[in-house]
Image (cartoon, rainbow, N blue to C red):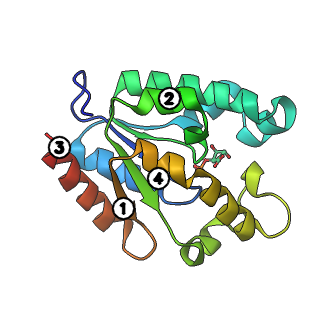
């Protein structure tokens, strides 16, 4: 499971608004490695995610995402993926040789976090119902790729980050 090329690489997966970016940033700081957010890289290279979905469709977004994940893993560090990255079998394959952490969050805790956002898959009526349905569709994939799970619903992001750092160091 551990990457031989970069022993401190760590990947964060989980549903939208689970805290992948906030936790990932803190974990990277503690481990003294770079932090990479693959969504940010896609935006920098190809423009806003909502536009990619609207103009080119989700399958094209998943292709761009797979390429961004491959590059990020090769660069090394703490890598935070978009919530739907695990839906792509090529991306799941890329994750096989890396320590992957699944961040979970309850629907109650996520309600405030998704309000007023610009996530294309949550557009329309009842974003929380959509969020819940999407999570259930993907849960099996998160569990398949991840070695460990942390819940971000109640505790401060820094505490969760510290626990992930401790877990990562135990892995050697
Ligand atoms: C998506 C999650 C988003 C982003 C895109 C699609 C998804 O990232 O990649 O809007 O399919 O769950 P976050 O998980 O960071 O919101």
Q: Earlier in the sequence, mark 1 or mark 2?
A: 2
Q: Which of 122 and 92 is in front in this view?
A: 92
Per the image, the residue denoted by label 3 is: 171
Mark 4 surroundings within 10 Å by alpha-carbon count, few (fewer than 14), some (14 through 19), many (20 or more): many
Secondary structure under the numbered disc 3 in the rendered image: loop
**Label 2 neighbour load within 10 Å: few <14, some 14-19, many 20+:** many
Q: Which of the two labelled residues, at mark 2 and mark 4, occupies the earlier sequence position?
A: 4
Label pair 2/4, CB-CB below 8 angstroms: no
- Marks 2 and 4, how far apart in space? 15 Å
How much space separates mark 4 and mark 3, taking CA atoms?
20 Å
Which mark is first along the chain, 1 or 3? 1
Q: Do the residues labelled 4 and 3 touch (CB within 8 Å)?
A: no
Between marks 3 and 1, how big is the CA–CA gap?
16 Å
Q: From the viewer's perspective, is 143 left or right of 68?
A: left
Ligand 1 within 8 Å, label 4 CB: yes
Structural distance between the alpha carbons of marks 2 and 3: 22 Å
The answer to whether 98 is drawn above or below residue 5 in the figure is below
Q: Which mark is residue 150?
A: 1
What residue is disc 4 on?
20
Q: Position of residue 92 (x, y in %)?
A: 49, 33
Q: Which residue is drawn at 36% across and 62% down?
A: 150
Give the residue pinned by disc 2: 69
Q: Which image quarter is the N terminus in?
A: top left
Location of residue 61 by image quarter: top right
Nearer to me, 168 or 117: 168
């Amino acid at each position: 499971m551990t990457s031989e090329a970069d022993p401190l690489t760590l990947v964060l997966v989980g549903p939208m608004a689970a805290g992948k970016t906030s936790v990932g940033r803190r974990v990277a700081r503690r481990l003294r490695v770079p932090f990479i957010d693959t969504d940010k890289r896609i935006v920098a290279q190809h423009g806003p995610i909502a536009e990619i979905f609207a103009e080119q469709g989700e399958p094209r977004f998943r292709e761009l995402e797979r390429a961004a994940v491959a590059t990020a893993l090769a660069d090394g560090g703490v890598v935070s993926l978009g919530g739907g990255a695990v839906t792509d079998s090529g991306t799941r394959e890329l994750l096989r040789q890396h320590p992957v952490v699944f961040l979970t969050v309850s629907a109650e805790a996520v309600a405030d976090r998704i309000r007023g956002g610009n996530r294309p898959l949550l557009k329309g009526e009842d974003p929380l119902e959509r969020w819940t349905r999407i999570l259930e569709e993907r849960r099996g994939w998160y569990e398949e790729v991840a070695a460990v799970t942390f819940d971000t619903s109640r505790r401060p992001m820094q505490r969760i980050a510290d626990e992930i750092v401790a877990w990562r160091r135990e892995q050697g």
